[in-house]
Amino acid sequence: MKSLLLIYPPLAKNCEPPPGLARLAGFLCGHGASCATYDANLHGFYYLLGLAPGGSDTWTRRAKKNLAANLAGLRNMATYGNFDRYKRAVADVNRLLSSVGQTQGVELSLANYQDEWSPLRSDHLLQVAEAYEESIFFPFYDEVVPDLLRAKGPEVIGISLSYLSQAVAAFALIGFLRARFPGLKIILGGGLITSWRRSPLWRDQFAGLVDQCLAGPGEGPLLKLLGGERREGVDITPQYDEPDGPGPAGELAKKYLAPGLILPYAAASGCYWNRCLFCPETAEENPYEPLAPERVVAEVASLCERHAPTLIHFLDNAVSPALMQRLVAQPPGVPWYGFARASPLLADVDFCRQLRRSGCVMLKLGLESGDQQVLDAMDKGTRLPMVRQVLAALKAAGIQTYVYLLFGTPAEDEAAARRTMEFTIRHHEEITFLNLAIFNLPLASPEAGGLAKSDFYAGDLSLYSDFAHPLGWSRRRIRAFLAQEFKRHAAIAPIIQRDPPLFTSNHAALFHPSFSG
Protein backbone atom coordinates (compact mmCIF):
# COMPACT_ATOMS: atom_id res chain seq x y z
CA MET A 1 0.00 0.00 0.00
CA LYS A 2 1.03 3.61 -0.53
CA SER A 3 2.09 5.64 2.49
CA LEU A 4 0.17 8.71 3.67
CA LEU A 5 0.99 11.82 5.71
CA LEU A 6 -2.01 13.71 7.14
CA ILE A 7 -1.45 17.41 7.89
CA TYR A 8 -3.63 19.79 9.89
CA PRO A 9 -2.73 23.32 8.69
CA PRO A 10 -2.67 26.64 10.58
CA LEU A 11 -4.56 28.55 11.98
CA ALA A 12 -7.18 27.35 14.46
CA LYS A 13 -7.48 27.22 18.25
CA ASN A 14 -4.67 25.20 19.81
CA CYS A 15 -6.30 23.59 22.81
CA GLU A 16 -6.77 19.97 21.65
CA PRO A 17 -5.39 17.67 18.95
CA PRO A 18 -7.22 17.54 15.59
CA PRO A 19 -9.79 14.73 15.86
CA GLY A 20 -10.22 14.11 12.14
CA LEU A 21 -6.57 13.13 11.74
CA ALA A 22 -6.77 10.82 14.75
CA ARG A 23 -9.85 9.03 13.43
CA LEU A 24 -8.35 8.62 9.94
CA ALA A 25 -4.99 7.44 11.29
CA GLY A 26 -6.64 4.86 13.54
CA PHE A 27 -8.74 3.48 10.72
CA LEU A 28 -5.97 3.38 8.12
CA CYS A 29 -3.31 1.96 10.43
CA GLY A 30 -5.80 -0.63 11.63
CA HIS A 31 -6.10 -1.76 8.01
CA GLY A 32 -2.33 -2.04 7.61
CA ALA A 33 -1.66 1.28 5.90
CA SER A 34 1.38 3.43 6.64
CA CYS A 35 -0.16 6.64 7.96
CA ALA A 36 1.51 9.45 9.93
CA THR A 37 0.04 12.73 11.19
CA TYR A 38 1.46 16.20 11.70
CA ASP A 39 -0.26 19.07 13.50
CA ALA A 40 1.18 22.01 11.54
CA ASN A 41 -1.35 24.21 13.31
CA LEU A 42 0.31 23.57 16.65
CA HIS A 43 3.87 23.92 15.39
CA GLY A 44 2.98 26.91 13.24
CA PHE A 45 1.53 28.66 16.28
CA TYR A 46 4.81 28.41 18.16
CA TYR A 47 6.70 29.45 15.05
CA LEU A 48 4.64 32.65 14.93
CA LEU A 49 5.27 33.35 18.61
CA GLY A 50 8.98 33.05 17.90
CA LEU A 51 8.66 35.98 15.47
CA ALA A 52 7.16 38.32 18.07
CA PRO A 53 8.95 41.71 18.12
CA GLY A 54 10.09 43.37 21.31
CA GLY A 55 7.29 45.88 20.98
CA SER A 56 7.14 49.65 21.11
CA ASP A 57 4.36 49.71 23.72
CA THR A 58 4.20 48.59 27.34
CA TRP A 59 1.61 45.86 26.77
CA THR A 60 3.55 44.11 24.00
CA ARG A 61 6.83 44.31 25.92
CA ARG A 62 5.14 42.83 28.99
CA ALA A 63 3.51 40.09 26.90
CA LYS A 64 6.87 39.11 25.38
CA LYS A 65 8.62 39.13 28.74
CA ASN A 66 5.91 36.94 30.28
CA LEU A 67 5.35 34.62 27.31
CA ALA A 68 6.82 31.48 28.89
CA ALA A 69 4.94 32.10 32.13
CA ASN A 70 1.66 32.72 30.31
CA LEU A 71 1.99 29.57 28.20
CA ALA A 72 2.79 27.56 31.31
CA GLY A 73 -0.17 29.18 33.05
CA LEU A 74 -2.58 28.10 30.33
CA ARG A 75 -1.33 24.54 30.87
CA ASN A 76 -1.83 24.74 34.63
CA MET A 77 -5.23 24.03 36.16
CA ALA A 78 -4.59 26.57 38.93
CA THR A 79 -4.88 29.35 36.34
CA TYR A 80 -8.44 28.29 35.57
CA GLY A 81 -9.31 28.84 39.21
CA ASN A 82 -8.52 32.54 38.82
CA PHE A 83 -10.48 34.00 35.91
CA ASP A 84 -8.65 37.32 35.93
CA ARG A 85 -5.29 35.55 35.70
CA TYR A 86 -6.61 33.35 32.90
CA LYS A 87 -7.92 36.32 30.91
CA ARG A 88 -4.62 38.15 31.32
CA ALA A 89 -2.63 35.16 30.04
CA VAL A 90 -4.91 34.74 27.02
CA ALA A 91 -4.84 38.46 26.24
CA ASP A 92 -1.05 38.65 26.47
CA VAL A 93 -0.41 35.65 24.20
CA ASN A 94 -2.98 36.99 21.76
CA ARG A 95 -1.29 40.39 21.84
CA LEU A 96 1.97 38.83 20.68
CA LEU A 97 0.28 37.03 17.80
CA SER A 98 -1.42 40.27 16.79
CA SER A 99 1.90 42.13 16.85
CA VAL A 100 3.47 39.48 14.59
CA GLY A 101 0.63 39.87 12.15
CA GLN A 102 0.92 43.65 12.12
CA THR A 103 4.52 43.42 10.93
CA GLN A 104 3.35 41.53 7.82
CA GLY A 105 -0.10 42.96 7.17
CA VAL A 106 -1.95 39.97 8.60
CA GLU A 107 -4.67 39.86 11.26
CA LEU A 108 -3.68 37.12 13.68
CA SER A 109 -5.31 35.89 16.86
CA LEU A 110 -5.49 32.71 18.89
CA ALA A 111 -8.68 31.85 17.02
CA ASN A 112 -8.35 33.37 13.55
CA TYR A 113 -6.19 34.29 10.56
CA GLN A 114 -7.12 36.93 7.99
CA ASP A 115 -5.18 38.71 5.28
CA GLU A 116 -5.84 40.32 1.90
CA TRP A 117 -6.77 36.98 0.34
CA SER A 118 -10.35 35.78 0.76
CA PRO A 119 -10.83 32.12 1.70
CA LEU A 120 -14.23 32.36 -0.01
CA ARG A 121 -12.78 32.96 -3.47
CA SER A 122 -11.15 30.09 -5.32
CA ASP A 123 -9.18 32.48 -7.55
CA HIS A 124 -7.63 34.01 -4.42
CA LEU A 125 -6.69 30.61 -3.01
CA LEU A 126 -5.16 29.58 -6.33
CA GLN A 127 -3.11 32.79 -6.33
CA VAL A 128 -2.00 32.06 -2.75
CA ALA A 129 -0.75 28.65 -3.90
CA GLU A 130 1.13 30.22 -6.79
CA ALA A 131 2.70 32.91 -4.60
CA TYR A 132 3.37 30.58 -1.66
CA GLU A 133 6.72 32.23 -0.86
CA GLU A 134 4.84 35.37 0.19
CA SER A 135 2.97 33.53 2.96
CA ILE A 136 3.81 34.37 6.57
CA PHE A 137 4.16 30.60 7.02
CA PHE A 138 6.61 30.05 4.13
CA PRO A 139 9.80 30.10 6.27
CA PHE A 140 8.11 27.63 8.62
CA TYR A 141 7.13 25.31 5.76
CA ASP A 142 10.56 25.68 4.19
CA GLU A 143 12.28 24.59 7.40
CA VAL A 144 9.89 21.89 8.55
CA VAL A 145 8.29 20.19 5.56
CA PRO A 146 11.40 18.80 3.80
CA ASP A 147 12.61 17.17 7.04
CA LEU A 148 9.12 15.86 7.70
CA LEU A 149 8.86 14.29 4.26
CA ARG A 150 12.28 12.70 4.55
CA ALA A 151 11.39 11.25 7.96
CA LYS A 152 7.94 9.94 6.99
CA GLY A 153 8.49 9.19 3.29
CA PRO A 154 4.86 9.62 2.17
CA GLU A 155 3.60 9.12 -1.36
CA VAL A 156 0.30 10.84 -0.59
CA ILE A 157 -0.35 14.02 1.42
CA GLY A 158 -3.76 14.50 2.99
CA ILE A 159 -4.62 18.01 4.16
CA SER A 160 -7.57 18.38 6.53
CA LEU A 161 -9.44 21.68 6.44
CA SER A 162 -11.97 22.34 9.19
CA TYR A 163 -12.21 26.14 9.30
CA LEU A 164 -12.03 29.11 6.95
CA SER A 165 -9.20 30.47 9.11
CA GLN A 166 -7.04 27.57 7.84
CA ALA A 167 -7.74 27.94 4.12
CA VAL A 168 -5.13 30.56 3.13
CA ALA A 169 -2.30 28.87 5.03
CA ALA A 170 -3.37 25.49 3.64
CA PHE A 171 -3.19 26.68 0.04
CA ALA A 172 0.21 28.24 0.64
CA LEU A 173 1.29 24.79 1.86
CA ILE A 174 -0.21 23.16 -1.23
CA GLY A 175 1.67 25.61 -3.46
CA PHE A 176 4.89 24.83 -1.60
CA LEU A 177 4.38 21.07 -2.01
CA ARG A 178 3.52 21.36 -5.68
CA ALA A 179 6.61 23.46 -6.40
CA ARG A 180 9.12 21.53 -4.29
CA PHE A 181 7.73 17.98 -4.39
CA PRO A 182 5.78 17.66 -7.65
CA GLY A 183 5.57 13.88 -7.49
CA LEU A 184 3.39 13.81 -4.38
CA LYS A 185 -0.33 13.15 -4.65
CA ILE A 186 -2.31 15.79 -2.68
CA ILE A 187 -5.77 15.07 -1.26
CA LEU A 188 -7.98 17.70 0.40
CA GLY A 189 -10.61 16.74 2.96
CA GLY A 190 -12.23 17.83 6.19
CA GLY A 191 -15.43 19.58 7.23
CA LEU A 192 -14.85 22.72 5.18
CA ILE A 193 -14.11 20.74 2.00
CA THR A 194 -17.27 18.70 2.59
CA SER A 195 -19.33 21.90 2.83
CA TRP A 196 -17.73 23.34 -0.32
CA ARG A 197 -18.24 20.17 -2.32
CA ARG A 198 -21.92 19.97 -1.36
CA SER A 199 -22.54 23.63 -2.16
CA PRO A 200 -24.48 24.48 -5.35
CA LEU A 201 -21.53 26.73 -6.30
CA TRP A 202 -19.01 23.87 -6.40
CA ARG A 203 -17.32 23.46 -9.80
CA ASP A 204 -14.22 21.45 -8.83
CA GLN A 205 -12.33 24.75 -8.66
CA PHE A 206 -9.03 23.22 -7.50
CA ALA A 207 -8.66 20.59 -10.22
CA GLY A 208 -5.10 20.71 -11.48
CA LEU A 209 -3.74 21.93 -8.17
CA VAL A 210 -4.90 19.07 -5.94
CA ASP A 211 -5.54 15.51 -7.06
CA GLN A 212 -8.82 15.03 -5.22
CA CYS A 213 -11.24 16.79 -2.86
CA LEU A 214 -13.08 14.35 -0.59
CA ALA A 215 -16.51 15.06 0.87
CA GLY A 216 -17.75 13.36 4.01
CA PRO A 217 -15.93 10.65 5.98
CA GLY A 218 -12.59 9.98 4.29
CA GLU A 219 -11.74 6.58 5.77
CA GLY A 220 -13.03 4.41 2.94
CA PRO A 221 -11.92 6.59 0.00
CA LEU A 222 -8.43 7.07 1.45
CA LEU A 223 -7.98 3.36 2.14
CA LYS A 224 -8.99 2.58 -1.44
CA LEU A 225 -6.66 5.27 -2.80
CA LEU A 226 -3.75 3.80 -0.83
CA GLY A 227 -4.48 0.37 -2.27
CA GLY A 228 -6.08 -1.28 0.77
CA GLU A 229 -9.39 -3.02 1.36
CA ARG A 230 -11.82 -2.59 4.23
CA ARG A 231 -11.85 -5.54 6.65
CA GLU A 232 -14.06 -6.46 9.57
CA GLY A 233 -12.80 -6.96 13.10
CA VAL A 234 -9.70 -4.71 12.97
CA ASP A 235 -8.84 -2.17 15.66
CA ILE A 236 -9.72 1.27 14.30
CA THR A 237 -9.52 3.24 17.56
CA PRO A 238 -8.44 6.85 16.87
CA GLN A 239 -4.69 7.46 17.18
CA TYR A 240 -3.75 10.69 18.95
CA ASP A 241 -0.02 10.64 18.38
CA GLU A 242 2.28 13.09 20.08
CA PRO A 243 2.92 16.16 17.87
CA ASP A 244 6.59 15.22 17.54
CA GLY A 245 7.35 16.38 14.01
CA PRO A 246 10.48 18.40 13.32
CA GLY A 247 10.35 22.17 13.73
CA PRO A 248 11.86 25.18 15.44
CA ALA A 249 9.59 24.95 18.47
CA GLY A 250 11.25 21.84 19.90
CA GLU A 251 9.79 20.47 23.10
CA LEU A 252 7.55 23.50 23.57
CA ALA A 253 5.49 22.50 20.54
CA LYS A 254 4.37 19.30 22.28
CA LYS A 255 1.94 21.25 24.43
CA TYR A 256 -1.60 22.35 23.65
CA LEU A 257 -3.05 25.33 25.46
CA ALA A 258 -4.93 23.37 28.08
CA PRO A 259 -4.15 22.01 31.56
CA GLY A 260 -3.65 18.46 30.36
CA LEU A 261 -4.92 16.69 27.26
CA ILE A 262 -8.43 17.52 26.07
CA LEU A 263 -9.40 14.41 24.11
CA PRO A 264 -11.81 15.16 21.23
CA TYR A 265 -13.95 12.18 20.27
CA ALA A 266 -16.79 11.82 17.75
CA ALA A 267 -19.37 9.16 18.61
CA ALA A 268 -21.46 10.02 15.55
CA SER A 269 -21.48 12.05 12.36
CA GLY A 270 -24.55 14.00 11.35
CA CYS A 271 -27.43 14.73 13.73
CA TYR A 272 -29.98 12.27 15.09
CA TRP A 273 -32.76 14.90 14.90
CA ASN A 274 -31.76 16.15 11.43
CA ARG A 275 -34.99 18.10 10.83
CA CYS A 276 -34.18 21.70 11.74
CA LEU A 277 -34.92 24.10 8.91
CA PHE A 278 -31.97 26.12 7.61
CA CYS A 279 -29.48 23.81 9.36
CA PRO A 280 -26.26 23.26 7.36
CA GLU A 281 -26.31 19.56 8.31
CA THR A 282 -29.76 19.21 6.77
CA ALA A 283 -28.92 21.41 3.76
CA GLU A 284 -25.79 19.35 2.99
CA GLU A 285 -27.73 16.09 3.44
CA ASN A 286 -25.21 14.70 5.90
CA PRO A 287 -26.55 11.34 7.12
CA TYR A 288 -26.66 10.41 10.77
CA GLU A 289 -24.12 7.64 11.35
CA PRO A 290 -23.64 6.80 15.04
CA LEU A 291 -21.21 4.33 16.54
CA ALA A 292 -22.74 1.75 18.83
CA PRO A 293 -22.71 3.06 22.43
CA GLU A 294 -20.87 -0.05 23.64
CA ARG A 295 -18.13 0.56 21.08
CA VAL A 296 -17.90 4.22 22.11
CA VAL A 297 -17.38 3.47 25.79
CA ALA A 298 -14.83 0.76 24.95
CA GLU A 299 -12.84 3.07 22.66
CA VAL A 300 -13.01 5.95 25.12
CA ALA A 301 -11.83 3.69 27.94
CA SER A 302 -8.90 2.52 25.80
CA LEU A 303 -7.97 6.08 24.86
CA CYS A 304 -8.18 7.25 28.47
CA GLU A 305 -5.93 4.42 29.61
CA ARG A 306 -3.37 5.32 26.94
CA HIS A 307 -3.46 9.13 27.15
CA ALA A 308 -4.78 9.99 30.65
CA PRO A 309 -6.76 13.03 29.45
CA THR A 310 -7.94 15.83 31.70
CA LEU A 311 -11.20 16.23 29.80
CA ILE A 312 -13.14 14.42 27.05
CA HIS A 313 -14.80 16.55 24.38
CA PHE A 314 -17.64 14.72 22.61
CA LEU A 315 -17.88 16.28 19.15
CA ASP A 316 -21.33 15.01 18.19
CA ASN A 317 -23.91 17.50 16.96
CA ALA A 318 -25.94 16.10 19.84
CA VAL A 319 -24.89 13.30 22.20
CA SER A 320 -27.70 10.77 21.87
CA PRO A 321 -29.83 9.70 24.85
CA ALA A 322 -28.66 6.12 24.26
CA LEU A 323 -25.03 7.14 24.62
CA MET A 324 -25.78 9.19 27.72
CA GLN A 325 -27.41 6.17 29.33
CA ARG A 326 -24.39 4.03 28.44
CA LEU A 327 -22.01 6.63 29.91
CA VAL A 328 -24.06 6.57 33.11
CA ALA A 329 -23.80 2.77 33.22
CA GLN A 330 -20.09 2.74 32.28
CA PRO A 331 -18.51 6.09 33.24
CA PRO A 332 -15.26 6.93 31.45
CA GLY A 333 -13.62 7.98 34.72
CA VAL A 334 -12.71 11.37 33.21
CA PRO A 335 -14.75 14.60 33.09
CA TRP A 336 -16.54 15.17 29.79
CA TYR A 337 -18.72 17.61 27.91
CA GLY A 338 -20.55 17.95 24.58
CA PHE A 339 -23.64 19.15 22.75
CA ALA A 340 -27.08 17.81 23.66
CA ARG A 341 -30.71 18.35 22.74
CA ALA A 342 -33.24 19.24 25.41
CA SER A 343 -34.95 15.90 25.97
CA PRO A 344 -37.21 14.22 28.54
CA LEU A 345 -34.15 12.35 29.80
CA LEU A 346 -32.40 15.61 30.70
CA ALA A 347 -35.58 16.95 32.30
CA ASP A 348 -35.22 14.20 34.94
CA VAL A 349 -33.12 15.59 37.78
CA ASP A 350 -32.25 12.10 39.05
CA PHE A 351 -30.85 11.15 35.65
CA CYS A 352 -28.92 14.43 35.47
CA ARG A 353 -27.35 13.63 38.84
CA GLN A 354 -26.31 10.25 37.46
CA LEU A 355 -24.94 12.02 34.39
CA ARG A 356 -22.91 14.30 36.61
CA ARG A 357 -21.52 11.27 38.46
CA SER A 358 -20.52 9.82 35.08
CA GLY A 359 -18.21 12.83 34.66
CA CYS A 360 -20.41 15.27 32.74
CA VAL A 361 -19.34 18.80 33.69
CA MET A 362 -21.01 20.79 30.90
CA LEU A 363 -23.63 20.41 28.19
CA LYS A 364 -23.97 22.74 25.23
CA LEU A 365 -27.61 23.32 24.33
CA GLY A 366 -28.64 24.66 20.92
CA LEU A 367 -31.79 26.36 22.17
CA GLU A 368 -31.72 29.03 19.40
CA SER A 369 -34.83 30.90 20.60
CA GLY A 370 -36.94 31.52 23.69
CA ASP A 371 -40.05 31.94 21.55
CA GLN A 372 -42.13 28.84 20.89
CA GLN A 373 -43.48 29.99 17.53
CA VAL A 374 -39.94 30.56 16.25
CA LEU A 375 -38.87 27.10 17.44
CA ASP A 376 -41.90 25.51 15.77
CA ALA A 377 -41.20 27.36 12.52
CA MET A 378 -37.65 25.97 12.56
CA ASP A 379 -38.95 22.43 13.31
CA LYS A 380 -36.61 22.26 16.30
CA GLY A 381 -38.79 19.70 18.05
CA THR A 382 -38.21 21.62 21.27
CA ARG A 383 -40.86 22.71 23.77
CA LEU A 384 -39.97 25.56 26.08
CA PRO A 385 -41.58 24.00 29.20
CA MET A 386 -39.22 21.05 28.74
CA VAL A 387 -36.25 23.39 28.24
CA ARG A 388 -37.10 25.04 31.55
CA GLN A 389 -37.12 21.63 33.25
CA VAL A 390 -33.83 20.68 31.60
CA LEU A 391 -32.09 23.88 32.72
CA ALA A 392 -33.38 23.41 36.28
CA ALA A 393 -32.38 19.73 36.37
CA LEU A 394 -28.86 20.39 35.06
CA LYS A 395 -28.41 23.23 37.55
CA ALA A 396 -29.57 21.02 40.42
CA ALA A 397 -27.17 18.26 39.30
CA GLY A 398 -24.16 20.61 39.12
CA ILE A 399 -23.75 20.48 35.32
CA GLN A 400 -22.81 23.73 33.59
CA THR A 401 -24.80 24.86 30.55
CA TYR A 402 -23.51 26.63 27.45
CA VAL A 403 -26.65 27.93 25.74
CA TYR A 404 -26.64 28.88 22.06
CA LEU A 405 -29.10 31.53 20.85
CA LEU A 406 -29.67 32.42 17.20
CA PHE A 407 -31.25 35.73 16.24
CA GLY A 408 -32.71 36.76 12.90
CA THR A 409 -34.20 33.54 11.56
CA PRO A 410 -36.98 34.21 9.02
CA ALA A 411 -39.74 33.51 11.56
CA GLU A 412 -38.33 35.84 14.24
CA ASP A 413 -39.29 39.49 14.64
CA GLU A 414 -38.24 41.97 17.29
CA ALA A 415 -41.06 40.92 19.63
CA ALA A 416 -39.92 37.29 19.42
CA ALA A 417 -36.32 38.32 20.07
CA ARG A 418 -37.47 40.17 23.16
CA ARG A 419 -39.25 37.03 24.35
CA THR A 420 -35.92 35.22 23.99
CA MET A 421 -34.36 37.94 26.12
CA GLU A 422 -37.12 37.51 28.72
CA PHE A 423 -36.54 33.75 28.74
CA THR A 424 -32.82 34.29 29.28
CA ILE A 425 -33.42 36.74 32.12
CA ARG A 426 -35.87 34.37 33.80
CA HIS A 427 -33.34 31.52 33.66
CA HIS A 428 -30.11 33.49 34.11
CA GLU A 429 -29.15 31.54 37.24
CA GLU A 430 -29.37 28.26 35.31
CA ILE A 431 -27.39 29.45 32.26
CA THR A 432 -23.64 29.32 32.84
CA PHE A 433 -22.46 30.56 29.43
CA LEU A 434 -24.08 32.09 26.36
CA ASN A 435 -23.25 32.04 22.68
CA LEU A 436 -25.09 34.72 20.68
CA ALA A 437 -25.17 34.49 16.88
CA ILE A 438 -26.96 36.18 14.01
CA PHE A 439 -28.57 33.86 11.48
CA ASN A 440 -26.79 33.19 8.18
CA LEU A 441 -28.83 31.66 5.36
CA PRO A 442 -27.17 28.47 4.03
CA LEU A 443 -26.92 28.58 0.25
CA ALA A 444 -27.92 24.95 -0.08
CA SER A 445 -30.94 25.26 2.20
CA PRO A 446 -34.11 24.09 0.38
CA GLU A 447 -36.12 26.62 2.42
CA ALA A 448 -34.11 29.54 0.96
CA GLY A 449 -36.10 29.58 -2.28
CA GLY A 450 -38.86 31.83 -0.97
CA LEU A 451 -36.52 34.53 0.35
CA ALA A 452 -35.06 37.52 -1.50
CA LYS A 453 -31.34 36.75 -1.40
CA SER A 454 -28.19 38.78 -2.03
CA ASP A 455 -24.45 38.19 -1.69
CA PHE A 456 -23.39 37.94 1.93
CA TYR A 457 -19.70 37.31 1.34
CA ALA A 458 -18.65 37.64 -2.30
CA GLY A 459 -17.02 34.46 -3.55
CA ASP A 460 -17.68 31.16 -5.26
CA LEU A 461 -16.82 29.31 -2.04
CA SER A 462 -19.29 31.17 0.15
CA LEU A 463 -21.63 28.90 2.07
CA TYR A 464 -24.17 31.56 3.04
CA SER A 465 -26.15 34.37 1.46
CA ASP A 466 -27.75 37.50 2.85
CA PHE A 467 -31.49 37.92 2.52
CA ALA A 468 -34.19 40.53 2.97
CA HIS A 469 -35.80 39.55 6.26
CA PRO A 470 -39.52 39.03 5.61
CA LEU A 471 -40.42 40.70 8.91
CA GLY A 472 -37.91 43.55 8.63
CA TRP A 473 -35.72 42.20 11.45
CA SER A 474 -32.44 43.15 9.78
CA ARG A 475 -28.89 42.33 10.86
CA ARG A 476 -28.30 46.01 11.66
CA ARG A 477 -31.30 46.11 14.01
CA ILE A 478 -30.31 42.81 15.62
CA ARG A 479 -26.76 44.01 16.28
CA ALA A 480 -28.08 47.17 17.92
CA PHE A 481 -30.53 45.18 20.05
CA LEU A 482 -27.85 42.76 21.24
CA ALA A 483 -25.25 45.44 21.95
CA GLN A 484 -27.47 48.07 23.53
CA GLU A 485 -30.04 45.99 25.39
CA PHE A 486 -29.49 42.23 25.55
CA LYS A 487 -25.85 42.16 26.62
CA ARG A 488 -26.25 45.10 28.98
CA HIS A 489 -29.10 43.70 31.04
CA ALA A 490 -28.07 43.25 34.68
CA ALA A 491 -29.04 39.56 34.68
CA ILE A 492 -27.35 38.72 31.35
CA ALA A 493 -24.16 40.79 31.49
CA PRO A 494 -22.47 38.53 34.09
CA ILE A 495 -23.10 35.48 31.86
CA ILE A 496 -21.48 37.23 28.91
CA GLN A 497 -18.53 38.37 31.02
CA ARG A 498 -17.60 34.90 32.26
CA ASP A 499 -17.25 33.43 28.77
CA PRO A 500 -13.58 32.45 28.26
CA PRO A 501 -12.15 35.01 25.78
CA LEU A 502 -11.22 33.63 22.33
CA PHE A 503 -11.36 29.97 23.44
CA THR A 504 -15.04 30.25 24.50
CA SER A 505 -16.67 26.78 24.72
CA ASN A 506 -13.36 24.97 24.14
CA HIS A 507 -12.18 26.08 27.59
CA ALA A 508 -15.49 26.73 29.35
CA ALA A 509 -15.82 23.25 30.87
CA LEU A 510 -12.45 23.72 32.60
CA PHE A 511 -14.07 26.35 34.83
CA HIS A 512 -16.38 23.79 36.43
CA PRO A 513 -15.94 23.95 40.22
CA SER A 514 -14.86 20.30 40.35
CA PHE A 515 -11.54 21.20 38.67
CA SER A 516 -10.64 23.69 41.38
CA GLY A 517 -11.21 21.24 44.15
Image: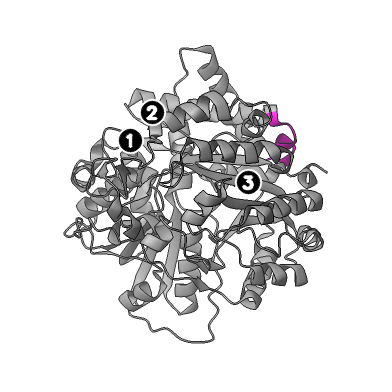
Q: Nearer the observer, disc 2 or disc 3? A: 3
Where in the figure is residue 406, as x and y percent of width and height? Answer: 50, 44
In the rendered structure, does residue 360 fall within the stretch colored magenta?
no
Image quadrant containing the N terminus: bottom left
Residue 100, picture quadrant: top left
**Judging from the image, what secondary structure is the residue with disc 3 in?**
strand
- Crowding near pointer 3: few (<14 within 10 Å), some, many (20+)? many
Label ID, residue 101: 2
What secondary structure characterizes most of the magenta part?
Answer: helix
Q: Position of residue 402 (x, y in %)?
A: 63, 46
Mark 2 or 3 closer to N-term? 2
The magenta span reads: 75-83
Q: Which residue is mark 3?
A: 402
Please tell me which residue is depicted at 71% across the width and 35% down the height of the picture: 79
Which is nearer the eye, 269 or 417? 417
Q: Residues within 10 Å of mark 2 (few under 14, many from 20)?
A: many
Q: Nearer the viewer, residue 112 or 145?
A: 112
185 in relation to 164, above or below: below
Relative to residue 473, is residue 291 depicted above or below? below
Amino acid residing under circle 2: Gly
For this orientation, the residue located farthest to the top is 57
Q: Are discs 1 and 2 less than 8 Å apart at CB? A: yes
Determine the secondary structure under disc 2: helix
Displayed quadrant of residue 191: bottom left
The answer to the question of whether label 3 and label 1 lie on touching residues, with beta carbons closer than 8 A, is no
Name the residue rendered at 39%, 29% in the picture: 476
Earlier-in-chain disc, 3 versus 1: 1
Q: In the rendering, at what x and y percent does residue 464 appear?
A: 32, 48
